[in-house]
Image (spheres, rainbow, N blue to C red):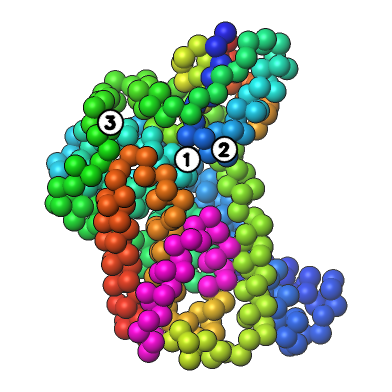
Amino acid sequence: MKLEVIGSGCKKCKALFELTEIVAKELGIHDTVLYSTDINKIVAMGLMSSPVLTVNDKPVLVGMLPDKERLKEIISKNI
Amino acid sequence: MFYPIQLLADWLTYTVFGIIPKTLLASAVNFFIFDTIKIFILLAGIIFIVSIIRSYLPPEKIRVILSRKNKYIGNVPASLLGIITPFCSCSAIPLFLGFVQAGVPLGTTFSFLIASPMINEVALVLLLGLFGWKIAIIYIVTGLIISILSGVVIGSLKVENLVESFVYENSVNGNNLELPSLSRIERINYALDYTTDILKKVWPYILVGIGLGAWIHGYLPADFLVEYAGSGKWYAVPLAVLIGIPLYSNAAGVIPLVSALTEKGVSMGTTLAFMMSVTALSLPEFMILKKVMKIKLIFIFAGIVSVGIVFTGYLFNIILK
């Protein structure tokens, strides 16, 4: 399982990263959540908003910070 | 349309708080309650609608439309599409790279980058709620003209050499991109999330802005600022633009404040120029754009937009006298 938050380093990106860590723990995912500020990765995927959350390198959330429950729903749907 | 809110504001002011009508305090409190409720209702409604539209037209789809367009005609749809796209400085770089690397011309990209923050839904709601629909429309139309023309000028300057070289080393093909598809419920959820996200971010600024505005409305004499910022003062417009540059993150609080100042003698053109400067010229955005372009290009971009805004300010100081 590879969870990665990619962002430009803005507040929203960090907040999504921290929330993802909490949610991953609650879902029993033991892999570390990765955090990258390499924007070229976002662009190379063809996306244009930050932050992006990928599950196994597939973007599942683009350009927004959902609340905890919704994030849980999105992650568990994609694992 | 806002009559029930006025009734509620009257009831709260005179009955619940027991303030004596026709006093300065009553006028300020009444104004504060009425404006706050009205603005938050408008914000929630309009941000929700725009978010729904946007869920059908994310930047990735906009890029496909823009990369097919002709070099000059592209500026018009780029500016129009900029209206519905939210602009957060965290997305400035991926937007810029994503557009340019997919072959969207530089001038078209700039039209989009200018329109997107300048004509945003929060600013529009505040303009509509506090200044009325005529000023809101003037703001949209002149904002569009400024972003279209600035993009055309930047495009014709042939400044591709001022973009950092790594930008052109990569290219992306955005045409076959598969985005996570959304059901109707997911779109509504997205719009709800987005609306609460924005409201959470802007409410303190709006309260402080409306609060100060209410105080000014109730306590300052009507022509208090004419002497300093009336339409007869030539320096008012450029000064307003300069003051607006560092205020970006506070656009939500600035507009209610300015609306009260307008009542006290700041002329309408100056006010429009100030609001455009607050939204379109943002210091944090300039700092971020430094990663992908040379400082010279940032100055060219800021300079052209500033000229457009100052011109708008003078023009409406004459027209809206």
Q: What residue type is labelled 2?
A: Lys
Q: Separation of disc 2 and disc 1 at Cα?
A: 8 Å
Q: Which amino acid does label 3 sit on?
A: Phe
Q: Which of marks 1 and 3 is in front?
A: 3
Give the percent coordinates (x, y) of residue B73.
17, 47
Which residue in the structure is indicated by mark 2? A12
Q: Residue A27 sits in which quadrant?
A: top right
Circle 1 chain: B
Please tell me which residue is depicted at 24% across the width and 27% down the height of the picture: B169
Q: Separation of disc 1 and disc 3 at Cα?
A: 20 Å
Residue interval drawn in magenta: B231-258
Identify whether B226 is placed above or below B294.
below
Q: Do the residues labelled 2 and 1 touch (CB within 8 Å)?
A: yes
Please tell me which residue is depicted at 62% across the width and 59% down the height of the picture: B205
Neighbor class of circle 3 (other Cα within 10 Å; few <14, some 14-19, many 20+) is: few
Circle 2 chain: A
Q: What residue type is labelled 1?
A: Cys
Please tell me which residue is depicted at 15% across the width and 43% down the height of the picture: B71
Circle 3 chain: B
Which residue in the structure is indicated by mark 3? B166
Secondary structure at badge 1 equals helix
> Was residue B14 drawn as part of the magenta stretch in this picture?
no
Secondary structure at badge 3 equals helix
Neighbor class of circle 2 (other Cα within 10 Å; few <14, some 14-19, many 20+) is: some
Horizontal arrangement in the rendering, residue A72 relative to residue A2 (left or right): right
